[in-house]
Amino acid sequence: MNAMEFGKVAVLFGGTSAEREVSLNSGSRVLAALRRQGVNAHPFDPAEMPLDALRAFDRAFIALHGRHGEDGTIQGVLELMQIPYTGSGVMASALGMDKWRTKLLWQASGLPVPAYALLAADSDFAEVEEALGLPIFVKPACEGSSIGISKVKRCGDLAAAYAEAAQHDPLVIAEQGILGGEYTVGIIGQGGQLRALPVIKIEPATEFYDYEAKYNRDDTQYRCPCGLPAEREAQIQKQALEAFRVLGGRGWGRVDFLMDEEGNAYFLEANTSPGMTDHSLVPMAARVAGIDYDHLVLQVLAGATLG
C-alpha cells in the first residue's frame, strides 16, 4: 500500500498496564518508523486520551503491552468503532494473554507444554514441589515481560514465590523448569497467510530471562541463527505456526518455547502484541530474514483488519 492509503493512523502505546514503560518504548519507535515512510501517524496513549477520540482515525497500530492493550480489551473497542487494527482479534488476544488457557488449548491440540499446576493460597506447596521437581518457575497467568516471575530452587520456597506472583494476578501458575535452552519464533503475515521467522535462541546472563535481561541489560545473548539443525528448526517453526493458529492468532506475533537436554521442545506462551524496542525479538528475527525495522512496521500496519 502507498503510505497515504493508510489514512490517519493512531499508534496506540503507553496505557495503564505494568508494561507501560516497555510500551512507550515500542510505540515511540513504531511511530518514528511510520513517519519516516510518509504515513500520517499520530501517538495515542489510552491512559491520557479518551477512547472516543479514536473515531478520528482510519486505522490503528497497537503497540500496547499487557492488560487493557494485549488482552482483547482495546481490540473490542476498535471492533465496535469499526477501526481496522494490527495483530490478533478479541478472542486470540484474550487467550494469548492467559497462560493457563493457552496451555489448555495447546494440550488439547497435542502440542507439548511443560508440566504445571495452578496455585492458590491454600495449595499444598510441598506436594506441588514434589510433583513438578525443582527448579520451578512461578508466574502470574495474565502478565507479560516476566513481571512477577520467580525461579524456585529450594524446597520450601514455593509459597513465597506464589505470594509474589499473586500480587500481580490472582491466577498463578507453577511450571516445571525445562533447562535445555529458551527460544522464540516470530510470526508475520497478511490475509490469513502466516510465516515463521528464523528461530532465536536466548541466552541471558542472569538466572533466567527476567525483566532486567529483556530490557535493561546488554549482556543477554541472542543467537540467530539459533544453532539448531535446519530440519529441526523447520519442524519447530511449523509447530509454532500451529500453536499460533490454534489460538486464532493473525497478523503477527511470537511463540516462545523451551528445549530440554534431549532436544524436545515445550511450548511456553504466545505474544499477540510483541515488543518493538531495540531489545525486541521479532525485529531481530525479521532483520535476519531480510526485513528491516521500517518495512516490518509497514507490513504489520498493512495487515490491519477487523473481525
Image (cartoon, rainbow, N blue to C red):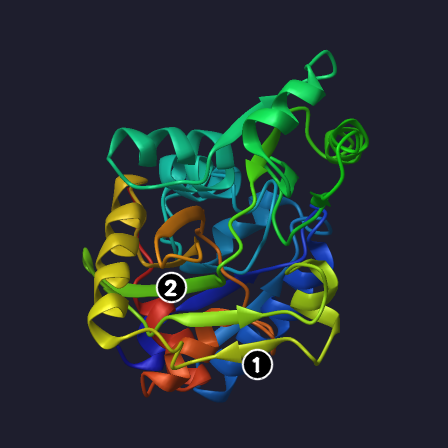
Could you tell me which quadrant the N terminus lies in?
Answer: bottom left
Q: Would you name the residue on which mark 1 appears? A: 32
> Which amino acid type is shown beneath numbered disc 2?
Val
**Looking at the image, residue 120 lies above or below residue 225:** above
Q: Nearer the viewer, residue 285 or 194?
A: 285
Q: How many marks?
A: 2
Q: Which residue is mark 2?
A: 185
Which SS class for mark 1?
A: helix
Residue drawn 67% across the image and 57% down it: 14
Query: Residue at 75% of width from left, 71% of height from top?
Result: 216
N-terminal-most mark, 1 or 2: 1
Neighbor class of circle 1 (other Cα within 10 Å; few <14, some 14-19, many 20+) is some
Q: Residue at 40% of width from left, 85% of height from top?
A: 287
Kind of residue sitting beneath label 1: Ala
Relative horizontal placement of residue 95, taking residue 220 as reference (left or right): left
Q: Quadrant of residue 211?
A: bottom right
Residue 78 screen position, x and y as percent? 44, 44
The answer to whether any part of residue 228 appears in the image is: yes
Picture coordinates of residue 130, whole percent (x, y): 61, 26
Relative image position of residue 57 (x, y in whole percent): 47, 58
Classify 113 as above or below 207: above
